[in-house]
Image (cartoon, rainbow, N blue to C red):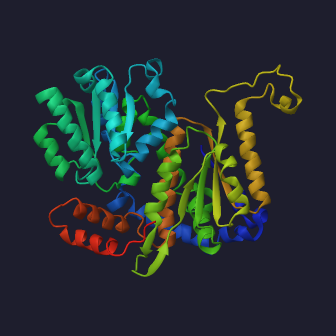
Amino acid sequence: MLTLDFTNCLATHVGSHGLDPDLLAPGSEVHNAIAAATKRLAGSRGKGWERWRELPFEPMRSQHVSAVTTIAEQCRGRFDTMVVLGIGGSALGNIALQSALNPPTWNLSDSVRKGAPRLFVVDNVDPAYFASVLDFCQQSTGNSGGLSRTLFNVISKSGETAETAAQFMVIRDLLSRTLGKDYAQNIVAVTDPAKGTMRQICEREGFTTLPVPDGVGGRFSVLSPVGLFSAAMCGIDSDALLTGAADMDKACGNPDLQHNPAAMLAALLVELGTSKGKTNHVLMPYSNALYLLADWYRQLWAESLGKEHDLQGNRVFAGFTPIKALGTTDQHSQVQLYREGPNDKVIGLMEVGQFDHDVTIPTGLNVEAIGYLEGKKMSALLNAEKRATEYALLESQRPNFTLKFPRIDAYHVGQFINLWQIATAYAGLLLNVDAYDQPAVELGKQATCGLMGRKGYEKHLSSVDEALGGDRRVI
């Protein structure tokens, strides 16, 4: 199991910057709040926007795995390249799974892929970026041949997200012009199973589809077909991911704070944030493979908890700023700030017990100053760096915790994902905010529609012009 070591978040180790252990003890206010939250989450699971809790369990699990596996088998061998079109929760989970569970040379080596496709996740509408990916797809085996061997996975519940809609319109036109009437065979859409603009397009054009389940928001969707399809296409074990998530869910159903890792993680971060001013939450994996899981975490933590109003409508400006870092790289770029800058952070370190591959540092250079490295494993150096950083943070009274992976595999990545998802649900209750809406995102979407000329959004265009026009100060 993934383990959470929170020793360095306590006042016994970081003085006044940590939490009094009695605050977390049975009978304490925090302990009782967690017990109440556990009861509420047990009552709401599987309902409304908490259907994501059921993704690792039957019947949703077998329904999704069966559908994903069937389509992946139909696609296997037909495509050299797969391009995911999506943004936010429709992209970050896919990127994180691929980075964590397949080698960094995946797109470069046929022998590594063993017949599976290259994977590109296009999560922006930067025209140069998008065009370069499309150019590669067309040129990889000649113009029509390249596109005929490229699968496009469009992920959008509604079909109206501007970024994904624009991407889709470009590739649909390109495919239909290049491949003709059979172009639909090169598209798999993950969308609402019954309604919405993309569903209408899929029915009309004959696209193969997978569902975005009802009650599963984008940032909680990686364990649904949203994330599982690209994972299956690239040889990642969906069953192991879901089993890890299910086992973590069971561990996080305990009303006793001391035996519930998600509840403890939420309680620590919320209490340190609200009572100790530690409102910046760093996640720092000591593993390149785990680095982009921190990107996924950033959306989950920021968008779920950053709210102007609480559930009663009071203005509270809740939330914390999630930050990603990479060990050891950011020991040389960020730790100076973390140790001697404002003491307003909690640093989450991520450690790996056993790497699948290791490198031994050779002997025989005969240079005294670096001779101590000879014959040592690089994994030993990496984990020594992690432990040294933990010690240095402790010396500066900077609260920190460690999440330890016994090894990096689909089972433990599934545990990590559900640990943070459940911790987010707990944190929302502790902060008394709705962890499932994102009202602040909507104004930017509406303004974009106005600027791009969408009918019915003219007032937003006028508002933008008024707010951003007039006397501008430019040097």
Tell me if residue 176 comes above or below residue 114 in the rendering: below
Image quadrant in which you'd find residue 358: top right
Q: Nearer the viewer, residue 464 or 86?
A: 464
Q: Is residue 22 visible?
A: yes
Residue at x 78% of width, y 65% of height:
12
Instruction: Residue 81: give x, y in percent of width and height.
Output: 34, 28
Q: Nearer the viewer, residue 302 or 145?
A: 145
Image quadrant in which you'd find residue 337: bottom right
Q: Nearer the viewer, residue 48 or 208?
A: 208
Tell me if residue 473 comes above or below residue 381 in the rendering: below
Instruction: Residue 190: give x, y in percent of width and height.
Output: 27, 43
Instruction: Residue 66: give x, y in percent of width and height.
Output: 31, 34
Residue farthest to the right, as pictured: 368
Residue at x 75% of width, y 71% of height:
16
Q: Is residue 7 left or right of residue 303?
A: right
Image quadrant in which you'd find residue 83: top left
Residue farthest to the front, as pictured: 475
Residue at x 60% of width, y 71% of height:
30
Instruction: Residue 132: give x, y in percent of width and height.
Output: 35, 35
Residue at x 49% of width, y 48% of height:
417
Q: Is residue 316 left or right of residue 10?
A: left
| Number of numbered labels in the structure image | 0
Specify the quadrant that holds the N terminus.
Answer: top right
Q: Nearer the viewer, residue 263 or 274?
A: 274
Q: Is residue 410 visible?
A: no
Q: Is residue 351 left or right of residue 195?
A: right
